[in-house]
Amino acid sequence: MIKDKINKELLPRHIAVIMDGNGRWAKKQGKNRIYGHQNGVDSVDRITEAAAELGIEYLTLYAFSTENWNRPQDEVNALMDLFVEAINANMEKLLANNVRLCVIGDHDRLPEKTRTNMQEAINKTNGSTGMTLVLAISYSSRWEILEAAKKIAADYKNGSVDLDGINEEYFASKLATGGMPDPDLLIRTSGELRISNFLMWQLSYSELYFTDVCWPEFKEQQFYEAILDYQSRERRFGKTSEQISK
Ligand code: FPP
């Protein structure tokens, strides 16, 4: 089995995923885009469970970008409902898998119902000590970096930080992902070769993995393939190969 080939000593601590291709996949089936998103929920469930079972510490899923607010209103509404339904329907499983839920993004833009439901779900999983599932909803990297810049400006103004104190570690702590390790592996489905305003600070040294498979068809097998590919890479972080093998 492909899963058995994964080296448990070399697991990525944090995997981030751009779940792309729901709409195109649905169109190929002669269905509407929302059908694609509904089928994408099954992949979310299965990848979350597979990641938790493997021992991945953080799984971040890009579910809705700031730019996605510009989609047709019925698709936006359907997605907002789907997030809540999917989280509620999977609460037992999240708890059984010891998964802690966390949401990053501009929550002020979310409908009240979605925001409240998300918060309730987050509270319910608060006691979990296993994998952290981070849903990026109404999220964009530029939004996040601007927010961090504003927080830093406020800290500087009130004297809680000076110029020398504004280093990488401090800056990272002001991002929505503050306290989390950077992703080791980024997966993007559906053949698109872009970062699309996702975790631009955090992905600086991540290994990138692109697959033509659309998100509704991305299941355990494809996930394990991505991890195996990651494990075949040499991560140098700017150093030489010789320095790394020492
Ligand atoms: C990208 O495909 C996908 C999205 C914008 C939505 C992702 C949402 C889900 C998978 C639903 C469930 C999520 C959670 C977290 C419970 P696309 O619509 O851009 O596809 P296209 O590029 O083919 O049009």
Image: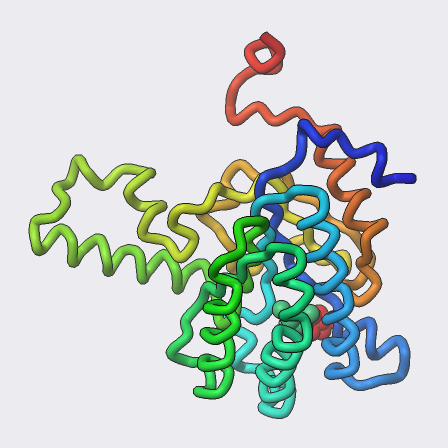
- Residue 159, x across and y down, in percent: 7, 49
Seen at 64% across and 81% down, the residue is 85
| Residue toward you, 46 or 23 | 46
Task: Name the one closer to the observer, 122 or 232.
Answer: 122
Q: Quadrant of the C terminus?
A: top right
Residue appearing at x 79%, y 74% in the figure: 39
Q: Picture coordinates of residue 188 (x, y %)?
A: 69, 54
Query: Is residue 195 visible from the viewing direction of this image?
Result: no
Quadrant in the picture for the N terminus: top right
Position of residue 244 relative to residue 66, above or below, is above
Q: Is residue 143 visible?
A: yes
Q: In the figure, is residue 208 to the left or right of 64?
A: right
Instruction: Point out residue 112 in the picture as x, y percentages from the top left corner.
Output: 44, 87
Count the numbered circles shown.
0
Quarter-of-image position of residue 164: top left
Quarter of the image where one finds residue 71 = bottom right
Q: How is the image coloured?
A: rainbow
Give coordinates of residue 213: x percent, y percent. 82, 58
- Occupied quadrant, residue 60: bottom right
- Front residue of 141/109: it is 109
- Farthest residue toward the bottom? 74
Give me the residue at 51% from left, 59% from top.
Answer: 197
Q: Ligand 1 lies in which image quarter?
A: bottom right
The one nearer the camera, 181 or 90, is: 90
